[in-house]
Image (cartoon, rainbow, N blue to C red):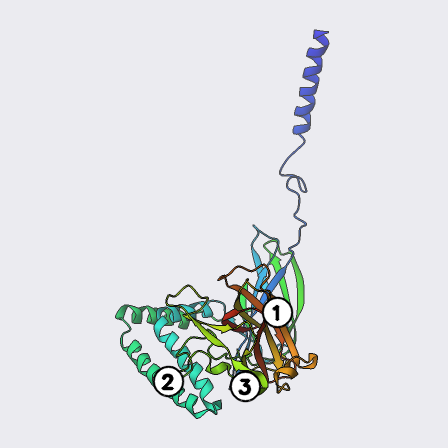
């Protein structure tokens, strides 16, 4: 048996040697297999459009810019990217590093840039401000900011000046963006529908193509955030530094709406959600808060605030958004005049603990709405009103 096993071992070994002698890297078609894998191109894009409108919503300028970034499944092989766009007329291209360098300059000149932005906000408001008292305050604030801006410019250090100069040099030396860049910014001439295609080619000459339809929307004015007067009910918070914390919340007349709420004061910060004062409503429900604010038709808003209720009695507090068609407290309770409303009960609450609430509402066709504050059967407090545009 050992003899037969010994002979079998040499037969197998001989066969392996014979087979290996038949393999040669010099023979055509033998060795590495040809790579039949083609690239799989893809790309993403981000809308970085910017625009400016005046206070009458007239467009001053708009830049319809989109940042495009290409990719493929090829992690090792060299690749070439080729973009195309249809229609191409008027489309220009921007080096992806330009915005980064511009932001770096803003960072170096942070104080100057911040003051310039505040000045721009006031210059935006002034042409459309009809209240002369507010206009006077805005003009005085603008003059003060301009003095601060000049001081900030004068105090820019030599080091910062050199850094800004170096960044400007980098900007001037940036190569022009091309349709062969992996990442670049497309600047479209106008709103419309564009087809953007991408061809990716690997280092073996294999290529593949993909395309998407990109819809460039018309620039629209930024929806203004409504202003709530004395939102935290503190003294001296009106535009001109005056106010007793509730001057903005008085109804047109007490006989139709009820008297304005009382003020609850604290001596230390941090006790109330905002400042040192809150709106206080006695349990009999005889006091209200009334403020009309401007809104943008069609926009959606989120109103937030804090409430605290006396738990010794079962009662509630209600914050409502009411149509200006309501001329009395009774009319504000008509379903047709209620845009949105939230009622919170004293049941389950904790004394002296404020809780935050939110109401989302749509302006609809309204250009202004009434924020109405009412309560019943228990004493309560409200504080720290705020409003944002829901995006």
In the image, which disc is placed on residue 187? none
Of callouts 1 and 3, which one flags the residue occurring earlier in the amino acid sequence?
3
Disc 2 vs disc 1: which is toward the camera?
1
Tag 2 and tag 1, C-beta contact below 8 Å: no
Where is residue 186 drawn, in percent x and y?
A: 56, 72
Look at the numbered disc 1 and give the secondary structure of its residue.
strand
Residue in the foreground of this view, choosing between 107 and 344: 344
Residue at mark 3 to residue at mark 2: CA–CA distance: 38 Å
**Quadrant containing the C terminus in the rendered view:** bottom right
Tag 1 and tag 3, C-beta contact below 8 Å: no
In the rendered image, which residue does mark 2 sit on? 142
Where is residue 59 drawn, in percent x and y?
A: 54, 85
Of callouts 3 and 2, which one flags the residue occurring earlier in the amino acid sequence?
2
Of callouts 2 and 1, which one flags the residue occurring earlier in the amino acid sequence?
2
Please report the residue visible at 60 percent of the width from the left and 61 percent of the height from the top.
347
Viewer can see residue 189: no
Viewer can see residue 279: yes
Residue at mark 2 to residue at mark 1: CA–CA distance: 42 Å
Please report the residue visible at 69 percent of the width from the left and 79 percent of the height from the top.
335
Look at the numbered disc 3 and give the secondary structure of its residue.
helix
Mark 3 surroundings within 10 Å by alpha-carbon count, few (fewer than 14), some (14 through 19), many (20 or more)? some
Disc 1 vs disc 3: which is toward the camera?
3
In the image, which disc is placed on residue 254? 3
Q: Is residue 189 above or below residue 21?
A: below
Please report the residue visible at 73 percent of the width from the left and 7 percent of the height from the top.
1
In the rendered image, which residue does mark 1 sit on? 343
Disc 3 vs disc 2: which is toward the camera?
3
| Residue 274, quarter of picture | bottom left
Residue in the foreground of this view, choosing between 103 and 253: 253
Where is residue 268 drawn, in percent x and y?
A: 37, 65
Residue in the foreground of this view, choosing between 32 and 47: 47
């Amino acid at each position: 048996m050992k003899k037969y096993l010994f002979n079998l071992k040499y037969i197998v070994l001989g066969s392996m040697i014979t087979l290996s002698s038949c393999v040669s890297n010099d023979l055509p078609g033998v060795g590495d297999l040809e790579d039949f894998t083609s690239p799989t191109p893809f790309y993403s894009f981000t809308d970085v459009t910017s625009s400016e409108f005046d206070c009458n919503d007239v467009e001053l300028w708009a830049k319809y810019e989109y940042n495009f970034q290409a990719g493929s499944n090829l992690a090792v092989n060299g690749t070439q990217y080729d973009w195309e766009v249809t229609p191409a007329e008027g489309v220009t291209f921007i080096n992806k590093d330009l915005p980064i360098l511009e932001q770096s300059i803003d960072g170096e000149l942070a104080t100057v840039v911040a003051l310039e932005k505040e000045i721009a906000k006031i210059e935006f408001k002034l042409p459309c401000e009809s209240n002369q008292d507010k206009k006077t305050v805005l003009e005085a604030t603008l003059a003060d900011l301009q003095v601060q801006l000049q001081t900030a410019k004068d105090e820019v250090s030599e080091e910062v000046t050199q850094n800004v100069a170096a960044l400007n040099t980098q900007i001037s030396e940036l190569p022009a963006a091309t349709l062969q860049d992996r990442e670049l910014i497309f600047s479209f001439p106008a709103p419309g529908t564009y087809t953007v295609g991408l061809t990716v080619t690997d280092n073996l000459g294999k290529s593949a193509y993909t395309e998407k339809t990109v819809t460039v929307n018309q620039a629209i004015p930024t929806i203004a955030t409504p202003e709530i007067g004395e939102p935290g009910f503190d003294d001296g918070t009106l535009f001109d530094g005056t106010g007793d914390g509730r001057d903005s919340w008085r109804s047109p007349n007490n006989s139709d709406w009820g008297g304005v709420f009382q003020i609850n004061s604290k001596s230390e910060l941090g006790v109330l959600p905002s400042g040192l004062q809150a709106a206080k409503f006695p349990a009999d429900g005889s006091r209200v808060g009334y403020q009309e604010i401007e809104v943008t038709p069609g926009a959606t808003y989120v109103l937030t605030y804090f409430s605290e209720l006396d738990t010794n009695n079962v009662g509630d507090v209600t914050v409502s958004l009411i149509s200006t068609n309501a001329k009395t407290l009774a009319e504000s309770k008509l379903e047709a005049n209620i845009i949105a409303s939230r009622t919170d009960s004293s049941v389950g609450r904790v004394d002296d603990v404020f809780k935050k609430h939110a109401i989302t509402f749509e302006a609809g066709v309204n250009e202004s709405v009434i924020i109405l504050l009412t309560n019943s059967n228990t004493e309560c407090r409200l504080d720290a009103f705020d409003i944002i545009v829901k995006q």
